Image (cartoon, helix red, strand yellow):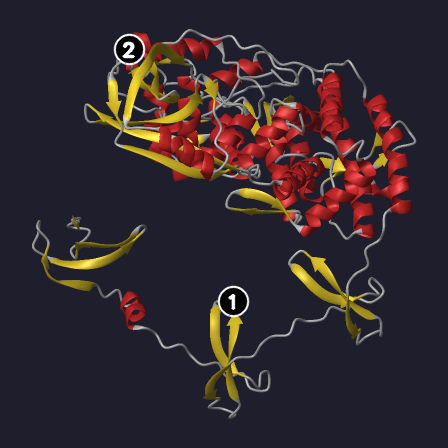
Amino acid sequence: MKKKLVIVESPSKSKTIEKYLGSDYTVTSSKGHIRDLSTSGKDGLGVDVENEFEPKYVISKDKKDVVKDLKKAVKDSDFVYLATDPDREGEAISWHLAEVLGLDETLENRIVFNEVTKDAVVEALNHPRQIDTNLVKSQETRRVLDRIIGFKLSKLLQKKIKSKSAGRVQSVALRLIVEKEREIDAFKPEEYWHINAKFLKDEIEFSGELAKYKNKKIEIHNVEEANSIYERLNKEFIVSNVKKTKRNRDSKPPFTTSTLQQAASSQLGFSAKKTMSIAQKLYEGIDLKSETVGLITYMRTDSIRLSDSFVQDADQYIEKVYGKKYVGKRKVSKKKENVQDAHEGIRPTSVERSPESVKEYLSHDEFRLYKLIYSRAVASLMAPAVFDATSVSLDNNGYEFKVTGSVIKFDGYLRLYSDYDKSEDMLLPELVETETLISQDIQKTQHFTKPPARYSEAKLIKTLEELGIGRPSTYASIIDTIQTRGYVSYEDKKFSPTESGYLTSDKLTEYFDSIINVEYTADMEHELDEISEGKDNYVSALRSFCNQFDPLLEKAYENMEKIEDKKTGELCPECGHDLVERKGRYGTFVACSNFPACRYIKKPEVQVEETGEMCPECGSPMIYKQGRFGRFEACSNYPTCKHIKKKEKSTAASAKKKSEPVIVEGEKCPNCGGEVVLKKGRYGEFKACINYPKCKTIIK
């Protein structure tokens, strides 16, 4: 009897799901996309621009065996379900699978689930649908658009200015970084001064800052002004006003793809690429003690919506663990423009699977990310934190100093989320109007305005999202691309453009400003959304773009100045043409200018360092060399003489090889009386009993 076949994208996900379904099902994986646009045809686009932008797809070289196995699996099955990811790209992969495997696209065989749990998968199997062709066309438009821009712009830049590539979204991200750097370069710092008074009451230290003079805001521009004010102040301050208010601080909504990447960057120090890689594993399935299950919902989402069932379970959990007063009122969020609300915000698949309960099954970084996701989702459903906020005005000869502070009265959601939401509020003593305070110290300090901060990864992602550029699921690859292309450097967790980045961005701005800009790129995202909703179509969107793009490209080819390779002053030993400096994947190298007719590459000169010894076999000097396993000493007369000096093994290495323990003199095991020895572990050297494993004592 034939089985039903379920095709997913990921092998690890297929293993998880196969454990949920009975013997009537076989689950296999496409291992991602099985085909892509070819690189044949005019300009190598794989798209017939003159014929309604007809795309030509080819099976990827590394997927031919996968397709062969899938076809056999389909032949051995009586029905096929397509269970790729629940987004546009996943929809497109399902469509490609249906095309290649010869499946009837009118069948209701497409299933989607937002979490890899047994209940979610079984529920999806009970509600299959047809492939959504609008979603497929939206993704196809994006792919063709990116291919046209990427291939044509990259070819132009490589020919004219030796840049490696350009792209619809990556070039806008680069432009933001370049423009920010120019803001920093143009910035002129301005001097200003602060005057602060420090106080002590009821053993509580606090301070106030000069804010007004005779009810008007005051600004101090130089030392003369600061000294003039300072001389008019005395140590006695009168409390002129005390204002107390109750302030609520609401919890933040659950993570979207973008906010997860931002928080993981700022809170955990993860790159966007690392965050998405770990989140993918948490989503696809983790082997727990009694089950294999996805710990989080799908991590590519713009939505902050949570399912009714999760909210209900979370409310019960919060009441059980923290108490009824910690249960919050559910906030209904309005859908933002340009948001795909097909699934939920990122949350744990079960509120009962607390981070601590699954910690032993996760790596260190998996645990940290899961804890962040879990805490944010559950905290979003908890009550607000409540503070008593106090604002105090202090008068000193008409100069008004402001003191602000607060005391937390109810921790609310901070009970769970305090590790990620720190409060810097100052604690104040009880202060009453008209009382006199004696200042412990009055200080005047000089400051200078600071230039705009460079983009961190979190800030760049936030800016891209706010401007409507790209999709959150693409931010990791965008950032990775501009770094690997050498357009930006990333130092002290901040981006700055390289010389190549400046040149590339400037030329694109000069010749393609109407297309490579924030507004146009955001508008294109809106148009792709329109296609996904059936309100626009593939051909008209691409034709409209090409009508604007093609004249700009033609003008750039005519007018953009070509940057010639820098000559070294040497001639090629093989053909006599000039040798020039070129930039490659591993840096700058010297090669023949007559490439590709001549493929000569000059080998870099190697500095020879003699050891001071002579070869015992031929008498030539011994030199240091660098090999696969590090530095070694060899004869300089290689390959005539192949003598290599053997390394002397250190005492420690010999001891390690012989497994001879290093005994700690004067110490004995408190449990069995055995010798105490030094051992090396994951976190460094430690002391333990020599009688391990019979005695497992570790000496602190």
Q: Disc 2 residue type?
A: Gly
Cα separation between marks 2 and 1: 61 Å
Q: Position of residue 526 (x, y in %)?
A: 72, 20
Residue nearest the observer in this picture, 178 or 207: 207
Left or right: where 245 falls relative to 674: right
Residue nearest the observer in this picture, 586 or 580: 580
Left or right: where 230 falls relative to 25: left
**Label 2 CA crowd tier, 10 Å (few <14, some 14–19, many 20+):** few
Instruction: Work out whether residue 366 can be spotted.
Output: no
Looking at the rendered structure, the secondary structure element under dot 2 is loop
Left or right: where 686 falls relative to 72: left
Q: Position of residue 384 (x, y in %)?
A: 38, 13
The residue carrying mark 1 is 628
The residue carrying mark 2 is 323
Quadrant hosting residue 603: bottom right
Q: Position of residue 193 (x, y in %)?
A: 45, 35
